[in-house]
Amino acid sequence: MSYEDGWAAIQLQKPARIPRTEYSVESHWELLQVVTGLPVAVDSPPELKERASLAFMRAWNYDFIWSTLIGRDDFGDVYTDMGHAEYAAGGVDRRDTIFSPFKTVDEVLDFDPWERLGPRDQGELTRRFEAHYQRNCARVPDAVNMTGIYTTLISGFIDLFGWDWLLLALGTDPERFGKLCARYAAWMQQYFDALAAARVPVVMIHDDIVWSAGPFMRPAWYRKFIFPHYKHYFAPLLESGKRIMFCSDGNFTQFVDDIAATGAHGFVFE
C-alpha cells in the first residue's frame, strides 16, 4: 500500500508502480480466508471481519480507498425501498421490503426537497465531512482516503422515488422532471458548499446516471438537465483545490468528456 503512489496517480504523475484498488471484494469472506489465512466467515464477529478486511487490503496493495458519507440516511423517512437482491456473501444484503411514500406521478414531479427535507446547517455538514475523512485515514493510514456524496442527483432520485416512479415520471414529462432536477440540485448544493469548506484533499462524487447498457434517457436530456448542475456542484470544490473523483455504476463512457468538462479529475467505472 502506498499513499504516495495513489496520490501521484491522482495528480496525473507516474509512480514507479501502477497504483491499484478494488471495490467491495474485501467482504467476500472465502477469498479473504485464502489470502489472509484468517478464519473469517459471514457469521464471524465484526472485529474479526474488520481485521481480515484490513489484512486483505494490505496484501492486495490498495492505494486508494473508495468512500462516501452522504446517502439515503440524510433523507430521513422520505425514501423508497425497492428491496435488495443477494450480492454479499451469505446473502446477508437480501431485503424483501418494498414501499414508497409516493403514490402518483404528480407527487414525484412536484417534489420540493426544501419543503420535505428542509435546510441543513453548513457548519455541521462540514464537521461531518472532516470527521468522516479523519476516521477513514485512521482506519487505513497508508492509502489515499476521501469522503464524499453518494446521492448527487440521479442517485438521489433512485433513493427518493425508486426506479419505477423515477422512470414513469421522467417519461411522462421530461421537461417538468428537468425542473425537479433543478430544485433537487439547489437543495444538494448546500452539501457541496459544505464539502468545499472541509479540510479534505480528495472527494468522491457518486451518481448512477446510466445502466449497464448505457444511458436510460436521451443523451441530450442529460446534457440539458444533469451536467450543468454538476458544474455548479463542482465549482466550490475546484476553488478549494480538491481533486474530484466521479463514480457511476453502468457504462457511462459516452459521457466521460461531458463530466470531465464539469471539473471532475478522475473516474471510477463499476
Image (spheres, grey):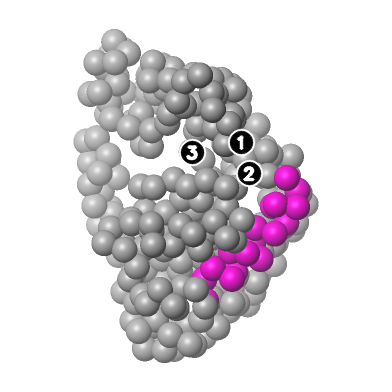
Q: Between disc 1 and disc 3, whose residue precedes?
A: 1
Can you tell which of label 1 and label 2 is closer to the viewer?
1
Most common secondary structure along the magenta stretch: helix
Q: Which residues are magenta?
A: 225-241
Report the residue at 58% width, 31% height from top: 13
Report the residue at 46% width, 27% height from top: 19
Mark 1 neighbour class, 10 Å CA radius: few under 14, some 14 to 19, many 20 or more: few
Alpha carbons under labels 1 and 3: distance apart? 17 Å
Q: Residue type at mark 1?
A: Gln
Mark 3 neighbour class, 10 Å CA radius: few under 14, some 14 to 19, many 20 or more: some
Residue on which the image places disc 3: 66
Side of 142 relative to 159 (left or right)? right
Q: Residue type at mark 3?
A: Trp
Residue 98: give x, y in percent of width and height: 30, 65
Residue 55: give x, y in percent of width and height: 41, 16
Residue on which the image places disc 2: 243
